[in-house]
Amino acid sequence: MDATKYIWSDGKLVPWSEAKVHVLTHSLHYGSAVFEGIRAYQCSDGSSAVFRLKDHAQRLINSGKIIRMEIPYTAEQLSEAIVETLKANGMHDAYIRPLSFVGYGEMGVYPGNNPVQTIIAAWSWGAYLGAEALEKGIRVKTSSFARSHVNTSMSKAKAAGNYINSILAKIEAKEDGYDEAIMLDTNGFVSEATGENVFIVRNGIIKTTPWTSILGGITRDSIMTLARDLGYTVEEQQFTRDEFYIADEAFFTGTAAELTPIRELDRRQIGAGHAGPVTKHLQQEFFKIVKGENPKYAAWLAHYSV
Ligand code: PPE
Protein backbone atom coordinates (compact mmCIF):
# COMPACT_ATOMS: atom_id res chain seq x y z
CA MET A 1 0.00 0.00 0.00
CA ASP A 2 1.39 3.38 -0.96
CA ALA A 3 0.97 6.18 1.55
CA THR A 4 -1.29 9.09 0.67
CA LYS A 5 -1.05 12.52 2.27
CA TYR A 6 -3.68 12.65 4.99
CA ILE A 7 -5.77 10.46 7.24
CA TRP A 8 -8.93 11.93 8.70
CA SER A 9 -8.95 11.45 12.46
CA ASP A 10 -12.03 12.65 14.35
CA GLY A 11 -12.39 15.82 12.36
CA LYS A 12 -8.72 16.59 11.71
CA LEU A 13 -6.61 15.78 8.69
CA VAL A 14 -3.42 14.26 10.07
CA PRO A 15 -0.32 13.54 7.94
CA TRP A 16 -0.32 9.81 7.00
CA SER A 17 2.84 8.99 8.99
CA GLU A 18 1.55 10.67 12.14
CA ALA A 19 -1.79 8.83 12.38
CA LYS A 20 -0.84 6.63 15.34
CA VAL A 21 -2.37 5.04 18.45
CA HIS A 22 -1.07 3.84 21.82
CA VAL A 23 -0.14 0.13 22.03
CA LEU A 24 -2.68 -0.30 24.84
CA THR A 25 -5.55 0.74 22.59
CA HIS A 26 -8.50 -1.51 23.57
CA SER A 27 -9.31 -2.58 20.01
CA LEU A 28 -5.75 -3.75 19.39
CA HIS A 29 -6.12 -6.28 22.21
CA TYR A 30 -9.71 -7.42 21.78
CA GLY A 31 -10.72 -6.70 18.15
CA SER A 32 -13.34 -4.18 19.28
CA ALA A 33 -13.41 -2.14 16.09
CA VAL A 34 -15.76 -1.80 13.12
CA PHE A 35 -14.75 -0.76 9.64
CA GLU A 36 -15.82 -0.18 6.05
CA GLY A 37 -14.32 -0.75 2.64
CA ILE A 38 -15.57 1.69 0.01
CA ARG A 39 -14.44 2.47 -3.51
CA ALA A 40 -14.39 5.70 -5.43
CA TYR A 41 -14.08 5.51 -9.20
CA GLN A 42 -13.10 7.97 -11.85
CA CYS A 43 -16.11 8.39 -14.12
CA SER A 44 -16.12 8.49 -17.90
CA ASP A 45 -17.10 12.19 -17.85
CA GLY A 46 -13.95 13.09 -15.89
CA SER A 47 -15.65 13.52 -12.52
CA SER A 48 -15.22 11.09 -9.64
CA ALA A 49 -17.81 9.26 -7.59
CA VAL A 50 -17.96 7.25 -4.39
CA PHE A 51 -20.05 4.12 -4.87
CA ARG A 52 -23.02 3.81 -2.46
CA LEU A 53 -21.39 6.18 0.01
CA LYS A 54 -24.39 6.67 2.31
CA ASP A 55 -25.06 2.93 2.49
CA HIS A 56 -21.50 2.25 3.59
CA ALA A 57 -21.60 5.05 6.17
CA GLN A 58 -24.85 3.67 7.55
CA ARG A 59 -23.43 0.14 7.68
CA LEU A 60 -20.53 1.43 9.80
CA ILE A 61 -23.01 2.91 12.26
CA ASN A 62 -25.06 -0.30 12.22
CA SER A 63 -21.95 -2.39 12.84
CA GLY A 64 -21.21 -0.18 15.83
CA LYS A 65 -24.75 -0.64 17.12
CA ILE A 66 -24.47 -4.43 16.89
CA ILE A 67 -21.27 -4.51 18.96
CA ARG A 68 -22.51 -1.81 21.39
CA MET A 69 -20.18 0.89 20.14
CA GLU A 70 -21.76 4.28 19.70
CA ILE A 71 -20.17 6.15 16.82
CA PRO A 72 -20.70 9.85 17.43
CA TYR A 73 -21.38 10.78 13.80
CA THR A 74 -24.37 10.57 11.50
CA ALA A 75 -24.16 8.86 8.12
CA GLU A 76 -24.21 12.34 6.53
CA GLN A 77 -21.28 13.52 8.64
CA LEU A 78 -19.27 10.39 7.86
CA SER A 79 -20.05 10.76 4.15
CA GLU A 80 -18.85 14.37 4.18
CA ALA A 81 -15.67 13.39 6.01
CA ILE A 82 -14.98 10.67 3.42
CA VAL A 83 -15.29 13.12 0.55
CA GLU A 84 -13.12 15.62 2.45
CA THR A 85 -10.44 12.92 2.83
CA LEU A 86 -10.50 12.12 -0.89
CA LYS A 87 -10.24 15.78 -1.84
CA ALA A 88 -7.42 16.48 0.63
CA ASN A 89 -5.49 13.58 -0.89
CA GLY A 90 -6.29 14.65 -4.46
CA MET A 91 -7.67 11.21 -5.29
CA HIS A 92 -9.79 10.60 -8.38
CA ASP A 93 -10.23 6.96 -7.48
CA ALA A 94 -9.48 5.18 -4.23
CA TYR A 95 -10.17 2.43 -1.77
CA ILE A 96 -11.48 4.06 1.38
CA ARG A 97 -11.17 2.58 4.85
CA PRO A 98 -13.17 4.16 7.69
CA LEU A 99 -12.52 2.53 11.08
CA SER A 100 -14.13 3.16 14.46
CA PHE A 101 -12.33 1.69 17.43
CA VAL A 102 -12.21 1.69 21.21
CA GLY A 103 -9.23 3.76 22.28
CA TYR A 104 -6.84 3.94 25.21
CA GLY A 105 -8.13 3.96 28.75
CA GLU A 106 -8.98 1.00 30.94
CA MET A 107 -7.79 -2.49 30.06
CA GLY A 108 -10.00 -5.55 30.32
CA VAL A 109 -12.66 -6.92 28.01
CA TYR A 110 -15.31 -4.46 29.22
CA PRO A 111 -14.86 -1.37 27.01
CA GLY A 112 -16.27 0.87 29.75
CA ASN A 113 -15.80 4.56 29.11
CA ASN A 114 -12.84 4.28 26.79
CA PRO A 115 -13.14 6.77 23.93
CA VAL A 116 -14.58 5.67 20.58
CA GLN A 117 -12.31 7.05 17.86
CA THR A 118 -12.90 7.20 14.11
CA ILE A 119 -10.39 7.46 11.30
CA ILE A 120 -10.75 7.49 7.51
CA ALA A 121 -7.85 6.47 5.28
CA ALA A 122 -7.77 6.23 1.49
CA TRP A 123 -5.24 4.64 -0.82
CA SER A 124 -5.01 3.14 -4.29
CA TRP A 125 -5.98 -0.52 -4.36
CA GLY A 126 -6.04 -2.30 -7.69
CA ALA A 127 -7.62 -5.69 -8.39
CA TYR A 128 -7.91 -7.40 -4.97
CA LEU A 129 -7.36 -10.95 -6.21
CA GLY A 130 -4.85 -10.07 -8.91
CA ALA A 131 -5.16 -8.37 -12.29
CA GLU A 132 -5.84 -11.64 -14.13
CA ALA A 133 -8.54 -12.71 -11.68
CA LEU A 134 -11.19 -10.33 -13.01
CA GLU A 135 -10.66 -11.77 -16.49
CA LYS A 136 -9.88 -15.44 -15.99
CA GLY A 137 -11.36 -16.28 -12.63
CA ILE A 138 -9.76 -17.76 -9.54
CA ARG A 139 -9.17 -21.11 -7.86
CA VAL A 140 -11.00 -21.59 -4.58
CA LYS A 141 -11.02 -24.14 -1.78
CA THR A 142 -13.60 -25.00 0.83
CA SER A 143 -12.04 -24.01 4.12
CA SER A 144 -11.59 -26.37 7.05
CA PHE A 145 -12.75 -23.39 9.15
CA ALA A 146 -16.51 -22.86 9.43
CA ARG A 147 -18.01 -19.37 9.32
CA SER A 148 -19.08 -18.47 12.85
CA HIS A 149 -22.45 -19.64 14.10
CA VAL A 150 -25.06 -16.88 13.85
CA ASN A 151 -24.95 -16.50 17.63
CA THR A 152 -21.17 -16.45 17.91
CA SER A 153 -19.70 -13.33 16.42
CA MET A 154 -22.40 -11.23 14.74
CA SER A 155 -21.39 -11.44 11.09
CA LYS A 156 -23.73 -8.59 10.09
CA ALA A 157 -21.30 -6.28 11.87
CA LYS A 158 -18.20 -5.58 9.83
CA ALA A 159 -16.22 -5.98 13.05
CA ALA A 160 -12.45 -6.40 13.21
CA GLY A 161 -12.67 -9.38 15.58
CA ASN A 162 -14.73 -11.34 13.03
CA TYR A 163 -11.77 -11.32 10.69
CA ILE A 164 -9.72 -13.85 12.70
CA ASN A 165 -12.04 -16.41 11.12
CA SER A 166 -11.28 -14.95 7.67
CA ILE A 167 -7.53 -14.77 8.33
CA LEU A 168 -7.40 -18.46 9.29
CA ALA A 169 -9.26 -19.45 6.13
CA LYS A 170 -7.21 -17.16 3.88
CA ILE A 171 -3.83 -18.39 5.17
CA GLU A 172 -4.93 -21.99 4.74
CA ALA A 173 -6.15 -21.37 1.18
CA LYS A 174 -2.99 -19.49 0.13
CA GLU A 175 -0.66 -22.07 1.65
CA ASP A 176 -2.56 -24.83 -0.10
CA GLY A 177 -2.03 -23.04 -3.42
CA TYR A 178 -5.50 -21.49 -3.88
CA ASP A 179 -6.46 -17.85 -4.37
CA GLU A 180 -9.37 -17.73 -1.94
CA ALA A 181 -11.50 -19.83 0.43
CA ILE A 182 -15.21 -20.27 0.85
CA MET A 183 -16.43 -21.08 4.31
CA LEU A 184 -19.42 -23.24 5.18
CA ASP A 185 -21.79 -22.22 7.96
CA THR A 186 -22.17 -24.37 11.07
CA ASN A 187 -25.02 -26.27 9.37
CA GLY A 188 -22.75 -27.15 6.45
CA PHE A 189 -24.20 -24.77 3.85
CA VAL A 190 -22.07 -22.41 1.79
CA SER A 191 -21.72 -19.08 3.64
CA GLU A 192 -19.24 -16.60 2.15
CA ALA A 193 -15.56 -16.09 1.44
CA THR A 194 -12.96 -14.39 3.61
CA GLY A 195 -13.83 -10.94 2.27
CA GLU A 196 -16.47 -11.56 -0.40
CA ASN A 197 -20.03 -12.80 -0.85
CA VAL A 198 -20.63 -15.70 -3.18
CA PHE A 199 -22.99 -16.35 -6.11
CA ILE A 200 -23.58 -19.39 -8.34
CA VAL A 201 -25.48 -19.61 -11.61
CA ARG A 202 -27.20 -22.91 -12.47
CA ASN A 203 -29.80 -23.60 -15.13
CA GLY A 204 -30.18 -19.86 -15.73
CA ILE A 205 -30.94 -19.05 -12.09
CA ILE A 206 -28.62 -16.90 -10.02
CA LYS A 207 -28.32 -17.93 -6.38
CA THR A 208 -26.65 -16.25 -3.47
CA THR A 209 -26.49 -17.31 0.16
CA PRO A 210 -29.12 -15.80 2.47
CA TRP A 211 -28.36 -13.01 4.93
CA THR A 212 -27.69 -15.29 7.90
CA SER A 213 -24.03 -16.00 8.69
CA ILE A 214 -22.74 -13.50 6.13
CA LEU A 215 -21.92 -9.82 5.94
CA GLY A 216 -24.67 -8.01 4.05
CA GLY A 217 -22.46 -7.01 1.17
CA ILE A 218 -23.29 -3.76 -0.58
CA THR A 219 -21.86 -5.17 -3.80
CA ARG A 220 -24.03 -8.28 -3.26
CA ASP A 221 -27.09 -6.05 -2.95
CA SER A 222 -26.06 -4.04 -6.03
CA ILE A 223 -25.54 -7.18 -8.12
CA MET A 224 -28.89 -8.68 -7.02
CA THR A 225 -30.66 -5.44 -7.98
CA LEU A 226 -28.81 -5.16 -11.27
CA ALA A 227 -29.39 -8.81 -12.20
CA ARG A 228 -33.13 -8.57 -11.49
CA ASP A 229 -33.32 -5.34 -13.50
CA LEU A 230 -31.65 -7.17 -16.39
CA GLY A 231 -34.34 -9.86 -16.22
CA TYR A 232 -32.46 -12.63 -14.42
CA THR A 233 -34.05 -14.68 -11.65
CA VAL A 234 -32.13 -14.19 -8.41
CA GLU A 235 -32.72 -16.33 -5.35
CA GLU A 236 -31.34 -15.86 -1.86
CA GLN A 237 -31.21 -19.48 -0.89
CA GLN A 238 -28.99 -21.93 0.97
CA PHE A 239 -26.93 -24.25 -1.18
CA THR A 240 -24.32 -26.92 -0.57
CA ARG A 241 -20.76 -27.31 -1.80
CA ASP A 242 -21.79 -30.12 -4.16
CA GLU A 243 -24.39 -27.88 -5.81
CA PHE A 244 -21.55 -25.38 -6.22
CA TYR A 245 -19.42 -28.10 -7.92
CA ILE A 246 -22.06 -28.55 -10.64
CA ALA A 247 -22.84 -24.85 -11.11
CA ASP A 248 -22.54 -23.45 -14.63
CA GLU A 249 -20.85 -20.29 -13.31
CA ALA A 250 -19.79 -18.82 -9.98
CA PHE A 251 -18.41 -15.50 -8.80
CA PHE A 252 -17.52 -13.44 -5.75
CA THR A 253 -18.68 -9.92 -5.00
CA GLY A 254 -17.08 -7.37 -2.68
CA THR A 255 -15.90 -3.79 -2.66
CA ALA A 256 -12.26 -4.84 -2.89
CA ALA A 257 -12.89 -7.92 -5.11
CA GLU A 258 -15.56 -6.16 -7.23
CA LEU A 259 -17.01 -9.02 -9.30
CA THR A 260 -14.44 -11.81 -9.55
CA PRO A 261 -15.24 -15.02 -11.46
CA ILE A 262 -14.50 -18.41 -9.85
CA ARG A 263 -13.11 -21.03 -12.20
CA GLU A 264 -12.46 -23.88 -9.79
CA LEU A 265 -13.67 -25.12 -6.40
CA ASP A 266 -11.90 -28.00 -4.63
CA ARG A 267 -10.29 -29.16 -7.91
CA ARG A 268 -13.62 -29.28 -9.74
CA GLN A 269 -13.74 -26.97 -12.74
CA ILE A 270 -16.76 -24.69 -12.58
CA GLY A 271 -18.60 -24.57 -15.91
CA ALA A 272 -16.25 -23.90 -18.79
CA GLY A 273 -13.40 -22.99 -16.41
CA HIS A 274 -13.49 -19.26 -17.14
CA ALA A 275 -15.91 -16.38 -16.65
CA GLY A 276 -19.29 -17.50 -18.01
CA PRO A 277 -21.74 -15.35 -19.99
CA VAL A 278 -23.92 -14.27 -17.04
CA THR A 279 -20.86 -13.43 -14.94
CA LYS A 280 -19.35 -11.39 -17.78
CA HIS A 281 -22.62 -9.61 -18.44
CA LEU A 282 -23.03 -8.59 -14.79
CA GLN A 283 -19.38 -7.62 -14.49
CA GLN A 284 -19.56 -5.36 -17.56
CA GLU A 285 -22.77 -3.71 -16.40
CA PHE A 286 -21.40 -3.26 -12.88
CA PHE A 287 -18.28 -1.49 -14.13
CA LYS A 288 -20.46 0.78 -16.29
CA ILE A 289 -22.52 1.73 -13.25
CA VAL A 290 -19.55 2.61 -11.03
CA LYS A 291 -18.09 4.75 -13.81
CA GLY A 292 -21.32 6.67 -14.17
CA GLU A 293 -22.21 5.24 -17.57
CA ASN A 294 -25.70 4.06 -16.61
CA PRO A 295 -28.02 6.91 -15.56
CA LYS A 296 -30.52 4.42 -14.13
CA TYR A 297 -28.22 3.95 -11.13
CA ALA A 298 -27.15 7.58 -10.70
CA ALA A 299 -28.50 7.55 -7.14
CA TRP A 300 -25.75 5.07 -6.17
CA LEU A 301 -23.02 7.59 -6.99
CA ALA A 302 -21.83 10.46 -4.81
CA HIS A 303 -19.97 12.69 -7.23
CA TYR A 304 -17.12 14.92 -6.13
CA SER A 305 -14.41 16.88 -7.84
CA VAL A 306 -10.79 16.97 -6.83
N1 PPE B 1 -18.10 -10.60 3.29
C1 PPE B 1 -17.01 -10.24 4.01
C2 PPE B 1 -16.58 -11.11 5.12
C3 PPE B 1 -16.35 -9.06 3.67
O1 PPE B 1 -15.29 -8.70 4.39
C4 PPE B 1 -16.79 -8.28 2.59
C5 PPE B 1 -16.07 -7.01 2.21
C6 PPE B 1 -17.93 -8.69 1.88
C7 PPE B 1 -18.56 -9.85 2.27
C8 PPE B 1 -18.51 -7.88 0.75
O2 PPE B 1 -19.10 -6.70 1.23
P1 PPE B 1 -19.20 -5.38 0.32
O3 PPE B 1 -17.83 -4.85 0.20
O4 PPE B 1 -20.10 -4.48 1.06
O5 PPE B 1 -19.75 -5.79 -1.00
N2 PPE B 1 -14.68 -7.04 2.42
C9 PPE B 1 -13.92 -5.81 2.48
C10 PPE B 1 -12.54 -6.02 3.07
C11 PPE B 1 -11.54 -6.75 2.27
C12 PPE B 1 -10.17 -6.72 2.94
O6 PPE B 1 -9.32 -7.60 2.64
O7 PPE B 1 -9.90 -5.83 3.74
C13 PPE B 1 -13.92 -5.10 1.15
O8 PPE B 1 -14.16 -5.70 0.11
O9 PPE B 1 -13.68 -3.89 1.16
Image (cartoon, grey):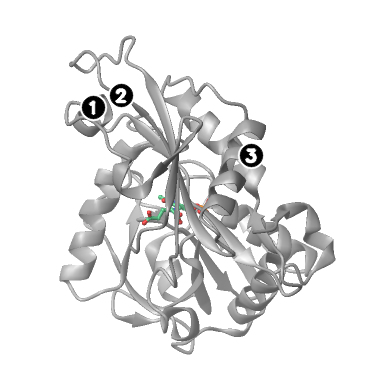
**In the image, residue 113 lies at what x, y percent?**
34, 10
Q: Label 2 amino acid?
A: Gly
Indicate whether 109 appears above or below 304. Answer: above
Q: Quadrant of the C terminus?
A: bottom right
Q: Earlier in the sequence, mark 3 or mark 1?
A: 1
Pointer 1: residues within 10 angstroms few (<14), some, or many (20+)? some
CA separation in Å, label 1 and label 2: 5 Å
* Side (left or right) of 160 relative to 279: left
> Please, what secondary structure does the residue beneath circle 1 have?
loop
CA separation in Å, label 2 and label 3: 23 Å
Indicate whether 259 appears above or below 120. Answer: below
Q: Earlier in the sequence, mark 2 or mark 3?
A: 3
| Picture residue at 63% right of the left edge, 53% below the top | 221
| Picture residue at 46% right of the left edge, 27% below the top | 64
CA separation in Å, label 3 and label 1: 26 Å
Indicate whether 150 appears above or below 142. Answer: above
* Side (left or right) of 166 relative to 53: left
Residue 80: which disc?
A: 3
Pointer 2: residues within 10 angstroms few (<14), some, or many (20+)? many
Residue that carries the numbered disc 2 in the rendered image = 103
Camera-side residue: 141 or 16? 16
Residue that carries the numbered disc 1 in the rendered image = 25
Q: Label 3 amino acid?
A: Glu
> Please, what secondary structure does the residue beneath circle 2 have?
loop
Labels 1 & 2 near each other (Cβ < 8 A): yes
| Picture residue at 59% right of the left edge, 59% below the top | 40
Pointer 3: residues within 10 angstroms few (<14), some, or many (20+)? some
